[in-house]
């Protein structure tokens, strides 16, 4: 049964903060089907880390809803190397946007987080209630603390001021618009670049970071955008909502799959001096499935189209 739409988007003004990022740009594309007016502003015109300008912008453009996809994000290594950037920037962006939305009376805000908010040893698949039940994974604790603060801020404004602020926790995402820089990217775009370069240069082997044994869950960003728009329309509540595919695989199996798609046939080596990060973070998708949403893009198909995007945009 289709869930009741509590916030129809037709004719609404929806601000996608962070519209140039992989997630934000996918949300802008997805919103085209909703009959709403999509507002965007570039980083050079508005720095969301500055409270005054952020409040002024929201007061001037008065969005009915905000999707907060603006964030400092990155893979396992850069998370570990730039703790101050990941903690500070994400904390202030969330604080500035939510406080301004409250002051101006924005009807709805959707805050985005990440599956790394959960304890490192949370039972799998991870249910939403596992939040703050144990210690975090060290490689991304700074980012996770900021994102947990984002969830708590949304809850606090709801409790104290009655604001309809909600939050969603996507799993590891990939797709068009991803960052393919080998130092700062997540694993899937990194493997696409590595496999492509290994194939065209005839490299004798391809090296992945860590042991290859950690498991990760991946969701195509178009599926994620669809889930987020769905939540914006049908969900109101304090609880953050997991957004995942429901399946995971080892990094070694992912590397095999990417090499197969890209056509690299050489051996895959492991660099155990690089961190593995959390051993597993498969999220329970029960809540969002009960709201009538499910993903549509199988992992292999998503990697094929992302590789095509990489060939035409990122080389
Ligand atoms: O995607 P990723 O960087 O981040 O790494 P996390 C996932 C796994 O892939 C780790 C391994 O075990 C990496 O060691 N890996 C293998 C590689 N080869 C590579 C490679 O060439 N590049 C990269 N980047 N990884 C991030 C968090 O955690 O996930 C963030 O740091 C956020 O806070 C994000 O939550 C979604 O999945 O470990």
Image (spheres, rainbow, N blue to C red):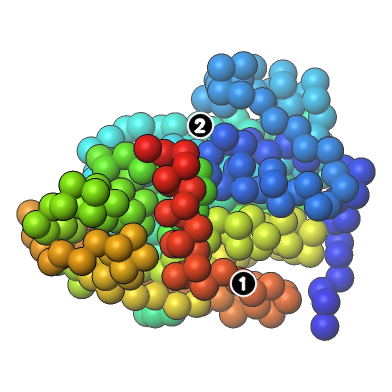
- Lower position in the chain sequence, tag 1 or tag 2: 2
Q: Is residue 291 above or below residue 61?
A: below
Split into quadrants, the picture shows ligand 1 in the one at bottom left
Query: The N terminus lies in which quarter of the figure?
Result: bottom right
For residue 296, which numbered disc appears in the image?
A: 1
Outermost residue, right side: 11
Residue depicted at 68% across the width and 39% down the height:
16
Q: Residues within 10 Å of mark 1 (few under 14, many from 20)?
A: few
The residue at the point 13 percent across, 66 percent down is 267
Mark sitting on residue 92: 2
What residue is drawn where x is 75% and y is 48%? Answer: 31
Q: Secondary structure at mark 1?
A: loop
In the rendered image, the vertical position of residue 1 relative to residue 70, given as above or below: below
Residue 238 position within the rendered picture, expressed as x and y whole percent measured from the top left: 66, 61
In the image, residue 89 above or below residue 284? above
Is 20 above or below relative to 110? above
Residue 15 % position (x, y): 73, 37
- Which picture quadrant has residue 102? top right
Mark 2 lies on a secondary structure that is: helix
Q: Position of residue 20 (x, y in %)?
A: 57, 34
Q: Nearer the viewer, residue 69 or 132?
A: 69
Q: Which mark is residue 273?
A: none
- Left or right position of 152 against 72: right
Residue 115 percent coordinates (x, y): 44, 61
Q: Observer-nearest residue: 290 or 156?
A: 290
Nearest the eye: 275 or 195: 195
Q: In this rendering, which labeled residue sits more in front, label 1 or label 2?
A: 1
């Amino acid at each position: 049964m289709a869930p009741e739409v509590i916030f129809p988007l037709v004719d609404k003004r929806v601000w996608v903060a962070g519209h140039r990022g992989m997630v934000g740009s996918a949300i802008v594309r997805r919103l085209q089907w909703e009959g709403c007016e999509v507002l965007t502003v570039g980083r050079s015109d508005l720095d969301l880390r500055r409270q005054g300008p952020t409040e002024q912008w929201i007061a001037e453009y008065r969005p009915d809803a905000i999707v907060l996809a603006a964030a400092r994000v990155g893979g396992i290594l850069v998370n570990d190397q730039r703790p101050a950037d990941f903690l500070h920037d994400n904390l202030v962006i969330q604080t500035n946007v939510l406080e301004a939305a409250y002051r101006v009376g924005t009807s709805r805000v959707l805050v985005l987080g990440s599956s790394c908010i959960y304890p490192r040893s949370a039972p799998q698949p991870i249910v939403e209630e596992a939040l703050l039940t144990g210690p975090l994974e060290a490689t991304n604790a700074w980012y996770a603390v900021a994102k947990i603060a984002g969830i708590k801020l949304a809850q606090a404004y709801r409790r104290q001021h009655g604001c309809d602020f909600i939050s969603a926790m996507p799993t590891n995402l990939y797709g068009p618009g991803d960052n393919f820089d080998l130092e700062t990217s997540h694993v899937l775009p990194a493997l696409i670049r590595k496999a492509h370069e290994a194939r065209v240069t005839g490299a004798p082997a391809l090296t992945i970071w860590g042991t290859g044994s950690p498991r990760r869950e991946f969701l195509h960003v178009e599926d994620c955008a669809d889930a987020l728009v769905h939540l914006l329309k049908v969900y109101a509540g304090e609880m953050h909502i997991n957004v995942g595919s429901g399946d995971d695989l080892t990094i070694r199996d992912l590397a095999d799959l990417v090499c197969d798609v890209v056509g690299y046939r050489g051996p895959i080596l492991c660099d155990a001096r690089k961190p593995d990060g959390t051993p597993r973070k498969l999220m329970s998708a029960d809540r969002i499935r009960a709201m009538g949403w499910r993903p549509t893009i199988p992992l292999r198909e998503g990697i094929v189209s992302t590789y095509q995007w990489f060939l035409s945009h990122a080389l």
